[in-house]
Amino acid sequence: EAYHQLMVDINEVQHQYEVLGGYNYQGDTEKVLQGLGFSREDFNKLTDTFSGGWRMRIELAKLLLQNNDVLLLDEPTNHLDIESIIWLENFLKSYPGVVVIVSHDKMFLDNVTNRTIEISLGRIYDYNKSYSKYLVLRNELKEQQLAAQKNQEKQIQQTERLIEKFRAKASKASMAQSLIKKLDRIERIEVDDEDNSVMTLNFPVSVTPGKVVVEAHGVSKSYGQLNVLNHVDLLIERDSKTAF
């Protein structure tokens, strides 16, 4: 009985391992790493031996291999070369789950996404289009709003002139009041504002630096028996451009 239960447990664990892609995990891992620019020689290296940019690629690979229902990516192309970006585009287009991307790479967004959401000045604009097509529709919407607003303003001005005209005649006073109420009920057409704000950073110098930035006299340097510098005098002044 204990042996039978053990076999049942083993079969259950084996089934879960298979469902989670355990048998394909190594192959999938190698495929993703190579797609992101790693060579097979890199597979056995410690992550600490890679630069910051390559470690970001490793983190991206870990995310892609988790096969989550929802994949959130913030500027995923920042540390990738062209070949890796093309591979990532193809990977994401065939990804079975939902992919949400924040990116300034317009071409990448056009090649991968089919829906664009803009959050601006407290409003959300949602279009089932790629980024470039969204921009076209967004501009068309604003042009329509401007035209409608201009037409409405024209009608309002005409109504206001009638009100002033009718007010001058006692027999037309009731009509003037009726037009005033009509104006009050009008819902004014608004044109969506654009967030054109730019962050400005300023680092003021509290004290003007001196004229001399670097000054050295009689500097010597050697590596073993090799003399590199021998009693060198050096003067670098503010605003100078020096090359070595």
Image (tube, rainbow, N blue to C red):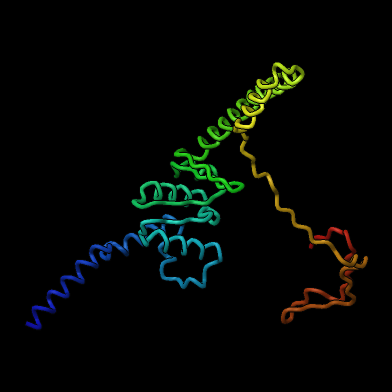
The quadrant of the picture occupied by the N terminus is bottom left
Residue 28 at x, y percent in the picture? 33, 59
Above or below residue 154? Residue 86 is below
Above or below residue 94? Residue 186 is above
Seen from the viewer's position, the closer of residues 173 and 34 is 173
Seen from the viewer's position, the closer of residues 17 and 180 is 180
Residue located 59% across and 33% down the image: 187
Q: Residue furthest left?
A: 1
Question: Is 74 left, or right, of 21 in this rendering?
Answer: right
Q: Residue furthest right?
A: 211
Q: Quadrant of residue 115?
A: top left
Residue located 90% across and 76% down the image: 217
Residue 185 at x, y percent in the picture? 60, 31
Q: Residue furthest bottom?
A: 2
Residue 79 at x, y percent in the picture? 54, 57
Residue located 87% across and 73% down the image: 232
What count of labels does the image hold?
A: 0
Seen from the viewer's position, the closer of residues 170 and 112 is 170
Seen from the viewer's position, the closer of residues 195 and 192 is 192
The quadrant of the picture occupied by the C terminus is bottom right
Residue 112 at x, y percent in the picture? 44, 44
Q: Quadrant of residue 41?
A: bottom left
Question: Is 179 left, or right, of 218 in this rendering?
Answer: left
Above or below residue 186? Residue 131 is below
